[in-house]
Image: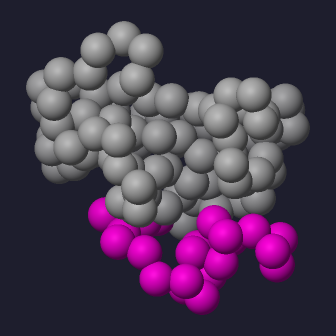
């Protein structure tokens, strides 16, 4: 998607503070963090919503979650972390490219 900011970050057209990358996902620092550690995990394939994932993307989503778990210590999340997936305007999704917020590095009260 040529107008998607995350697609532009994935393509290297917009710089980001990358912390991990493989053939399927990119993890980078959020530019407006709400926790000591606030990362975004973005699949390189463009789709906006979980409802668009379908069976064809189920394996990608599973591998993405497993990768986050495998990287937790490397990312400084050994004491715990929260994953947030906003879906739609009412949920606060501002970029229409599926992404997972990874929050940690501090106690996170419920509701953040």
Q: Position of residue 47 (x, y in %)?
A: 80, 51
Question: What is the residue that sits farthest to the top in this orientation?
Answer: 110
- Residue at left offset 46%, top offset 83%: 15
Q: Residue at x 65, y 78 (%)?
A: 8
Residue 7 pos. (x, y %): 68, 71
Q: Quadrant of the N terminus?
A: bottom right
The quarter of the picture where residue 102 lies is top left
Question: Residue 51: image x %, image y %?
Answer: 84, 30
User: For residue 10: magenta?
Assistant: yes
Closer-to-camera residue (61/16):
16
Residue numbers of the magenta segment: 1-22
Q: Is residue 82 above or below residue 66?
A: above
Q: Residue at x 28, y 28 (%)?
A: 81
Q: Is residue 59 shown to the viewer in this render?
A: no
Residue 45 shows in this picture: yes
User: On the rendered image, what quadrant is the C terminus found in?
Assistant: top left
**Residue at 16% in and 30% down:** 106
Q: Residue 79's spot in the image, x, y percent?
A: 13, 26
Query: Relative to 24, is 78 above or below?
Result: above
Give the side of residue 49 with respect to residue 72, left or right.
right
Q: Image check: 104 left or right of 23?
A: left
| 51 in relation to 96, above or below | above
Left or right side of 109 for 95? right
The quadrant holding residue 92 is: top right
Residue sitting farthest toward the bottom: 13
Magenta span contains residue 37: no
Relative placement, left or right, of 107 versus 59 is left
């Amino acid at each position: 998607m040529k107008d998607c900011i995350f697609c532009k970050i994935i393509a290297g057209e917009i710089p980001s503070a990358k912390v991990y990358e493989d053939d399927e996902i990119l993890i980078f620092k959020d530019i407006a963090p709400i926790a000591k550690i606030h990362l975004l995990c973005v699949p390189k394939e463009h789709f906006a919503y979980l409802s668009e994932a379908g069976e064809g993307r189920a394996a990608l989503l599973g591998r993405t979650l497993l990768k986050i778990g495998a990287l937790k210590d490397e990312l400084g999340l050994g004491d715990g972390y929260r994953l947030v997936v906003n879906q739609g305007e009412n949920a606060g999704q501002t970029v229409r490219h599926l992404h997972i917020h990874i929050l940690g590095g501090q106690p996170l009260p419920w509701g953040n």
